[in-house]
Image (cartoon, rainbow, N blue to C red):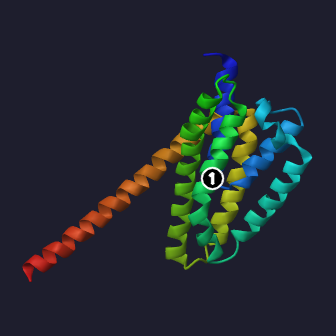
Amino acid sequence: MSTELITAVAIGIGLAASTGFRVFVPMLVAAVAAKAGFLPLNESFMWLASLTSIVILATATLVEIIAYYIPVVDNLLDTIATPLAVVAGTLLLTSVLPIDSELMRWITGAAVGGGSAAVVQSGSALTRLTSTKLTAGIGNPVVATVENVAATGTSLLSLVIPFFVIALFLLLVVFVFTRIRRKLRKNHMQKEAITDLYDKD
């Protein structure tokens, strides 16, 4: 496996995972980087580096960032953010993979890029849901700000030190699955407690 391929995969995964925080921020960063010549794109994805794409993505990014600061809307956005993040993650990884086979590029992009985005977005949605329950939504703007910084920071770092971003992503995966397992275990214990209570009656 060539160094070029390994680096491209690392950059792609970093950008894809970043879409789990915000869908359009990593796409905008990738578009600007490609326009500036810092990010090589596959020929079929050169449209991403066009001025039109950058303007559209910049507008979408601004709308997305503002929307996450609006109560109730932020939680509603999470319901559509996951499929959008998967699509964006797939596109970003596929766009930079130096693989000749178009089919293999898309399969890898969907499995790795889309999967990475889905995991991060699940963790993000879980954090916001927890904040909503504990603070009645008051703490959600703080969560939104952290996500904005994380989306921008990880996107930029993906272009410079992609392997560091992958390490952070792996830590996040462990965190998300640990939280989910604890929640499932807690629900199971609560059900058992209720069942025992009915049995005693």
Q: Is residue 143 above or below residue 114?
A: below
Asked where in the image residue 127 lies, by quadrant, the reply is bottom right
Foreground of the two, 10 or 109: 109
Residue at 68% x, 52% y is 150
What residue is disc 1 on? 85
Residue at 31% x, 64% y is 186
Query: Residue 20 in the image: x percent, y percent?
Result: 61, 52
Asked where in the image residue 97 lies, by quadrant, the reply is top right
Q: Is residue 93 above or below residue 78?
A: above
Quick one: quadrant of the C terminus?
bottom left
Query: Residue 68 in the image: x percent, y percent?
Result: 69, 68
Residue at 37% x, 61% y is 183
Picture mark count: 1
Query: Residue 194 in the image: x percent, y percent?
Result: 20, 75
Query: Residue 92 in the image: x percent, y percent?
Result: 69, 41
Give the left or right position of residue 185, taking residue 18 as reference. left
Give the left or right position of residue 110, taking residue 19 as reference. left
